[in-house]
Image (cartoon, rainbow, N blue to C red):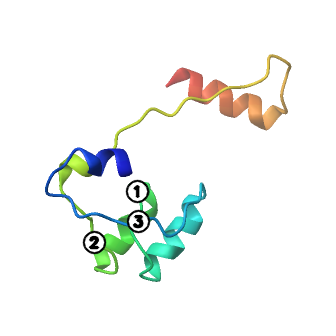
Amino acid sequence: MEDRLAHDPLAPRLARVVECDSADAQYEYVLRGLGVAWLPWSMVHADCQSGRLARAGDERMQVRFDVRMYRPKRRLSPWAEALWATLARQ
């Protein structure tokens, strides 16, 4: 977030209060009004639709990224193998 805001001269200067890697924890902090966070749209969509949360910033603040899956070379459980086969087809 700091990198993104540092390049925008109109962005407010924020003070880091807490830093965590858990999207669930960040979500709770945001719901409690303790700050802002980049969170997956799938996590906050319903809250944004209901007005409980609002997007901070405009389209420039959206972050697109790729999700890559990795697996060991050894055989996995039948369920995991089926999931992997489904994902590989997409």
Q: Residue at x 59, y 54 (%)?
A: 21
The reply, left or right, for residue 61 in relation to residue 36 is left
Disc 3 marks which residue? 44
Determine the residue positioned at 85% across, 19% down. 74
Residue 70 found in image quarter: top right
Tag nearer the camera, 3 or 1: 1
Per the image, label 3 sits on a secondary structure element best described as: helix
Task: Tell me which numbered mark, 2 or 3, is placed earlier along the sequence.
Answer: 3
For residue 38, which numbered disc appears in the image? 1
Q: Hey, what amino acid is under mark 1?
A: Trp
For the question of whether residue 40 can be seen, the reply is yes
Please give the label number shown on residue 54: 2
Q: Nearer the viewer, mark 2 or mark 3?
A: 2
Q: Where does the image place residue 20, in percent across and percent down from the top left?
A: 59, 59
Disc marking residue 12: none
Neighbour tally class for label 2: few under 14, some 14-19, many 20 plus, Cα within 10 Å:
few
Identify the amino acid type marked 2.
Answer: Ala
Q: Position of residue 88 (x, y in %)?
A: 58, 22
Q: Is residue 9 left or right of residue 4?
A: left
Number of other residues with Cα within 10 Å of mark 3, as a class: few under 14, some 14 to 19, many 20 or more: some
Q: Count of labels shown?
A: 3
Q: Residue at x 15, y 52 (%)?
A: 9
User: Image quarter for residue 47?
Assistant: bottom left
